[in-house]
Image: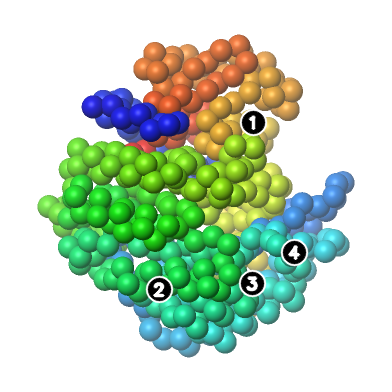
């Protein structure tokens, strides 16, 4: 069976052949390549260099709120399960310290913020006063531009209409609503009981509070999932008419993520069932008028993501696909990852380490990387493939002063199998990901990953599909 849906071809045989373990490429190099030699001093140095020699880029800010009331067994995020709001009160005091510390190292400029995101964990774990407190601390050190993008991840089980109204007052205009699956059997298996009614109430409240965009997150490959059951979930989601839908592939890695050990292997859907679920999801989403953005994202044709892709402005970062490609990203809180100039750095992962370092007036960085010329070259190639499904060879040669065919002779040779399979077209001027290859764009991007070439141990990554 092969299904064609506009800019996408779903071919199960091809998918089975090329479905390997690999990164999601929210960064290149990927976070597992960061090194401890790049620490607080290096991070401070690059914060200070932000404005040197050019007009400074606008900023994107990310805040990691790690707290959750209950545990979802599938979760691979860095989170803390608690009902004690004393813990979040302390954490917010230290977030304010990190805000002050990072901003003190930025040299001059207005520090304009075009994009703000609260992720987790569950950001709506915070009380109303705590939300006001964090936003006030942010505005104390940074200027949030008029009309900028402010987004938040929401668990509908813990949010009422008053909270959504407050989020609108605070300036949030985009919301990502976690659903995963409405099927009761699946919800029980992953310990996330959530009704369609409470979910719809939050989506309706967001629209009533002036949110420009509402996104719904789903996961396929969860325990006890069936094709028919996920089909019913898709129908209910489409009926709610969100602006964007993300349908993530569940990465079952119980050796890395302890909560996943509570999921019974016997409950896991087979590889064929997962493929059928994905095929159905693509069919139903495109039939409902959504555009396939890439990897696991769908958007309405008039959504900013779809428009950015058509105009060649789409970008990919740690929050997924984005319209803000020209921003430096400053991240706050445990495990959060920043991107400044040609560098990435990640904060420590535990509260104790985070508090100790900030008590000593030190940026809470544990590792990072400064990209060399080869990293920057390969990052631009992977970004282009992941976001636009095509790559201008001439543009890369001009921007990076290389002879593409000589530099990437090994990679072009490796691509031949994908060319022969109809996934990719390579000519004198372009590398183009064809409709049959779009679902496998991660596997195609992996060809240009120098670190994977040196390290074929990929068990720490999830499957591409």
Q: Nearer the viewer, residue 347 or 187?
A: 187
Of badges 2 and 4, the one in the foreground is: 2
Chain-order first, disc 1 or disc 2: 2
Residue 196 position within the rendered picture, expressed as x and y whole percent measured from the top left: 31, 68
Label annotation for residue 377: 1
* Residue on which the image places disc 4: 145
C-alpha gap between disc 1 and disc 4: 31 Å
| Residue behind mark 2 | 201
Image point 50% across, 83% down: which residue? 162
Distance between mark 1 and mark 2 Cα atoms: 46 Å
Residue 14 occupies quadrant: top left
Horizontal and vertical percent for residue 345?
Answer: 60, 54
User: Front-most of 245 and 143?
Assistant: 245
Q: CA distance from mark 1 to mark 3?
A: 37 Å
* Secondary element at image label 4: strand
Which residue does the numbered mark 3 point to in the structure image? 171
């Amino acid at each position: 069976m092969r299904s064609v849906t506009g800019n996408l071809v779903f071919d199960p045989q091809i998918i089975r052949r090329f479905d390997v373990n690999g990164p999601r490429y929210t960064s290149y190099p990927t976070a597992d390549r960061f090194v401890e030699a790049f620490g607080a001093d290096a991070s401070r140095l690059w914060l200070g260099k932000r404005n040197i020699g050019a007009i400074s880029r606008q900023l994107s800010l990310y805040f990691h709120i790690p707290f959750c009331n209950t545990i979802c067994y599938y979760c691979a995020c860095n989170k803390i399960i608690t009902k004690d709001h004393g813990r979040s009160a302390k954490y917010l005091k230290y977030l304010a310290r990190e805000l002050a510390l990072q901003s003190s190292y930025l040299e001059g400029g207005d520090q304009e913020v075009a994009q703000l995101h609260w992720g987790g964990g569950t950001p709506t774990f915070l009380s109303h006063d705590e939300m006001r407190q964090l936003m006030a601390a942010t505005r104390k050190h940074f200027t949030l531009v008029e009309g900028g993008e402010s987004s938040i991840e929401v668990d509908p089980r813990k949010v009422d209409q008053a909270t959504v109204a407050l989020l609108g007052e605070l300036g949030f205009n985009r919301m990502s609503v976690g659903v995963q699956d409405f099927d009761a059997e699946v919800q029980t298996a992953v310990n996330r009981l959530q009704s369609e009614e409470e979910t719809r109430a939050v989506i309706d409240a967001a629209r009533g509070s002036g949110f420009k965009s509402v996104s719904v997150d789903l996961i396929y490959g969860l325990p006890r999932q069936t094709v028919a059951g996920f089909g019913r979930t898709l129908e209910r989601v489409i009926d709610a008419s969100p602006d964007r839908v993300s349908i993530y592939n569940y990465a079952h890695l119980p050796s890395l993520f302890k909560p996943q050990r509570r999921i019974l292997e016997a409950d896991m859907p087979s590889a064929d069932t997962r493929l059928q679920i994905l095929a159905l999801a693509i069919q139903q989403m495109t039939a409902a008028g959504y555009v396939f953005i890439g990897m696991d994202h769908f958007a309405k044709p008039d959504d900013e993501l779809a428009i950015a892709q058509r105009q060649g402005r789409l970008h990919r970062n740690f929050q997924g696909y984005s319209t803000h490609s020209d921003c430096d990203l400053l991240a706050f809180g445990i495990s959060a990852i920043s991107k400044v100039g040609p560098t990435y750095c990640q904060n420590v992962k535990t509260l104790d380490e985070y508090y100790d370092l900030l008590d000593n007036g030190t940026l809470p960085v544990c590792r990072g990387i400064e990209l060399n010329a080869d990293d920057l070259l390969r990052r631009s190639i992977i970004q282009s493939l992941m976001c636009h499904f095509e790559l201008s060879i001439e543009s890369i040669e001009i921007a990076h002063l290389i002879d593409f065919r000589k530099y990437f002779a090994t990679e072009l040779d490796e691509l031949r199998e994908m060319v022969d399979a109809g996934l990719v077209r390579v000519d004198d001027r372009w590398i183009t990901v064809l409709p049959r290859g779009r679902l496998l764009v991660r596997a195609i991007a992996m060809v240009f990953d120098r670190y994977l070439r040196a390290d074929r141990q990929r068990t720490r990554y999830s499957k591409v599909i």
